[in-house]
Image (cartoon, helix red, strand yellow):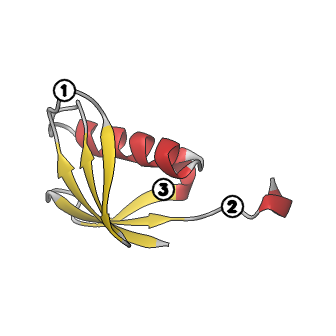
Amino acid sequence: MRVYVKVIPRSARNQVEKIIEGEYKVKITAPPVDGKANSMLIKVLAEYFKVAKSCVSIVGGKTARVKIINILKVKEEEK
């Protein structure tokens, strides 16, 4: 699954808001320095979608506020 995410770093708390199907706004506490925000984004999205962090990857916009995220869903029989 591929989704578009608008990231808001240095927020008071980590939060994921669904805007429309395939578009999300994610507030994270980490600053946008040395990849800390991207790492936190992956962690927060993995928790939200209930997948492993290895199933979440940034495929576009690594240094931009709007990012393209690829999320691999694990099938129930593979667990």
* Callout 2 amino acid: Val
Image vertical order of residue 8 relative to residue 78, above or below: above
Q: Secondary structure at mark 3?
A: strand
Q: Horizontally, is 8 left or right of 4 in the view?
A: left
* Callout 1 amino acid: Ala
Q: Secondary structure at mark 2?
A: loop
Residue found 35% across the figure and 41% down from its top: 39
Q: Position of residue 5 (x, y in %)?
A: 27, 61
Of all residues, the one furthest to the top in this rendering is 12
Q: Which disc number belongs to residue 74? A: 2
Q: Position of residue 55 (x, y in %)?
A: 55, 56
> Where is residue 6, by image quadrant?
bottom left
Q: Which disc number belongs to residue 12? A: 1
Q: Horizontally, is 2 left or right of 23 in the view?
A: right
- Image depth: mark 3 or mark 1 in front: 1
How packed mark 3 is, by other alpha carbons closer than 10 Å (few <14, some 14-19, many 20 or more), is: many
* Callout 3 amino acid: Val
> Where is residue 36, by image quadrant?
top left
Q: Which residue does the numbered mark 3 point to in the structure image?
A: 56
The answer to whether the residue labelled 3 contacts the one labelled 1, judged by CB atoms less than 8 Å apart, is no
Q: Position of residue 37 (x, y in %)?
A: 24, 40
How packed mark 1 is, by other alpha carbons closer than 10 Å (few <14, some 14-19, many 20 or more), is: few
Give the distance between the C-alpha atoms of the residues marked 2 and 3, in whole angstroms.
11 Å
